[in-house]
Image: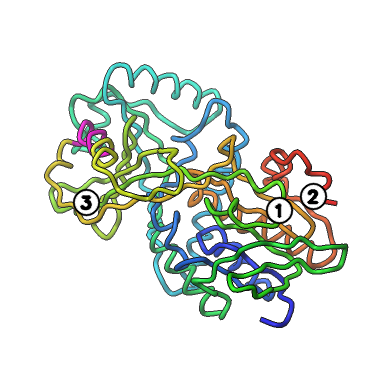
Amino acid sequence: MEKTLDVAVVGGGIVGLGVAWRLLAAGRSVRVFDQGAAGRGATWAAGGMLAPAAEIGFEELELYRLSRESLTRWPLFGLELEAASGMGVGYDATGTLVVADDRDAAGALRRLYSFQQEQGVPVTWLTTDEALDREPLLSPRIAGAIWSPEDHQVDNRAVARALVAVVKGKEALQEHTPVLSVEPAAEPGSPAAIVLKGGERVTARVVVMAAGAWTGGVGGLEPRPPIRPVKGQLLALRMEAPLVLRHVIRTPRAYLAPKSDGRLVVGATSEDVGFDTRVTAGGLYRVLDGAVRVVPAVEELEVLETWAGLRPAARDHAPLVGRAAPGVWLATGHYRHGILLAPVTADEVAREVGAALDGRDETSPHLAPFSPARLFPQADRLLG
């Protein structure tokens, strides 16, 4: 701890752990600091869907391109992580059905489908009967569906366990250690630093801020990164034959993600209520009602668990990834897409940081549109 690290990573979610894993593999000295148990925040709470086609936004084409790039990297990322950790990650390439639950929803889904076709997204429109052929548990009252064969999923909790095991195995993880502030490098060639709760100061040539919804609560950067928490409530049900879904189902009001261990993850609300992680009757009702409208058999399944998580959202709901101050990188603000964007974020941030450690200034073309400078009025002063 007394020696200057190559990289200090603030935040032990999928993004921070992924960046650390890639840097450790490149031979860098790295330590990850998490305020709680690593991997047990937004990463643990997520649904694990890898769905750039289903989530394409009419004004989010750059985010869609980044998401597509990350999806192409997920199979190798998963295989390498399984090899490094000796643990499975539950990658599932079965495909996704995006379903309309009434006539109004069908109209909106048709508009989405037309937009997807304009952008060359690999999707197919299905009639009700065609959708039921693919997924017999669907309600015969659905009003149409989009088949998205390249929207996949992963077991996000298995990924979290694997990343924690790999980084902890390198003795590079320090849990239950809140970081109070970050200190950018004072001048070229000098290190940055973080200050831990209790006053201990840790120096590093580069600091990577990957603290998710809590990024803005870490002092030292002014203005502070404009990240807010967006609450999502979810539950897990136990599937038992014959009531077993084959595919991820996305509806206007909920999603249903069947996992290989027999869980059916149902979510999620989207609530701007600050750092409130209470599970409420209203939140659970909304997601269950949305699920039952499309898959009536959900009513028969046993409830295993309920929970709430906090997505990290920037003002424009796009990631903040890149250099934010001398010696300081941000890797946060992934909102609903943290699991999906983990491979491209880990690879490209590690590449940029590695270049900086070697004395080179390198900007990833994949990350350039998501530079923190777009939301920081004093970007020129911050970057020096």
The residue tagged 3 is 237
First-in-chain label (2 vs 3): 3
Q: What amino acid is at disc 2? A: Leu
User: Could you say where residue 238 lies in the image, as x and y percent from the top left?
Assistant: 19, 54
Given residues 317 and 47, the one toward you in this image is 317
Say which mark, if any, is on residue 382: 2
Q: Residue 40 falls in which quadrant of the image?
A: bottom left
Given residues 365 and 328, the one toward you in this image is 328
User: Could you say where residue 316 lies in the image, as x and y percent from the top left?
Assistant: 59, 35
Q: Quadrant of the N terminus?
A: bottom right
Given residues 329 and 143, the one toward you in this image is 329
Q: Which residues are magenta?
A: 287-295
- Give neighbour class at mark 3: few <14, some 14-19, many 20+ (Cα, 10 Å): many
- Give neighbour class at mark 2: few <14, some 14-19, many 20+ (Cα, 10 Å): some
User: Could you say where residue 155 lies in the image, as x and y percent from the top left?
Assistant: 38, 57
First-in-chain label (1 vs 2): 1
